[in-house]
Image (spheres, rainbow, N blue to C red):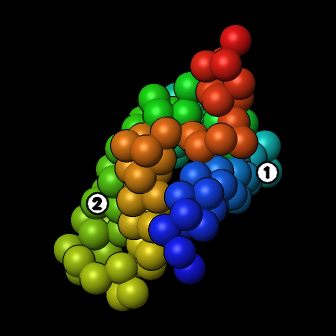
Amino acid sequence: MTNDSCAIWAPRTLSLLRIISGYLFLLHGIEKLFVAHIPLGSLMGAAGIIEFIGGILILLGLFGRIAAFICSGEMAFAYFMGHVAAKGHVLTPVHNGGDAAVLFCFVFLLIAASGSGPFSLDSLRKKS
């Protein structure tokens, strides 16, 4: 690939990564709130709310940097509380089941730092 094609495709693939990650994150929120019926006042309920609302915002690329930053923090918290502390302080994600939490954390950190990309409502808001 030439530098020109990288300059064209990198922002587009960032948008694609954001859309797919937001969709998957939204599904986790739907599971907690509407399938498992976790109480909203619990930590898992708060996680479900963040995942549901954050997933929608990230999927749409609306207030993407802020939403991704909050969701990244939630995933860091979930990893250490739900996977490291709950599994006897095992730090390796392969052994404590925290692979998805770590991956979501750093994908959302990338989006928080880079923005939502060209295929987003944030991009449309900037043009108007």
Give the residue at mark 2. Answer: 80
Compare marks 1 and 2 and give the one earlier in the sequence: 1
Horizontally, residue 67 falls left or right of residue 87, namely right
Whether residue 56 is visible: no
- In the depicted structure, whether residue 82 falls above or below residue 116: below
12 is higher (above) or lower (below) than 118: below
Q: In what quadrant of the picture does the C terminus appear?
A: top right
Dividing the picture into quadrants, the one containing residue 50 is: top right
Circle 1: element type: helix
Looking at the image, residue 115 sits to the left or right of residue 125; the answer is left
Local packing at callout 2 (Cα closer than 10 Å; few below 14, some 14-19, many 20+) is some
Residue 35, label in figure: 1
**C-alpha distance separating marks 1 and 2:** 25 Å
Which residue is depicted at the point 42% across and 72% down? 98
Residue 21 lies, with reference to residue 39, above or below; the image says below
Q: In the drawing, does residue 84 fall left or right of residue 39?
A: left
Q: Residue at x 39, y 66 (%)?
A: 102
Q: Provide residue 93's location: percent of width, then percent of height.
A: 36, 79
Determine crowd level at label 1: few under 14, some 14-19, many 20+ residues with C-alpha closer than 10 A. few
The x and y percentages for residue 126 are: 61, 19
Q: Residue at x 38, y 50 (%)?
A: 109
In the foreground, 116 or 93: 116
Element assignment for label 2: helix
Which residue lies most toward the right here? Answer: 35
Number of numbered discs present?
2
Is 81 or 70 nearer to us in this picture? 70
- Give the residue drawn at x 45%, y 29%: 66
In this view, 88 is above or below 65: below
Q: Residue 118's x, y, as percent?
A: 65, 41
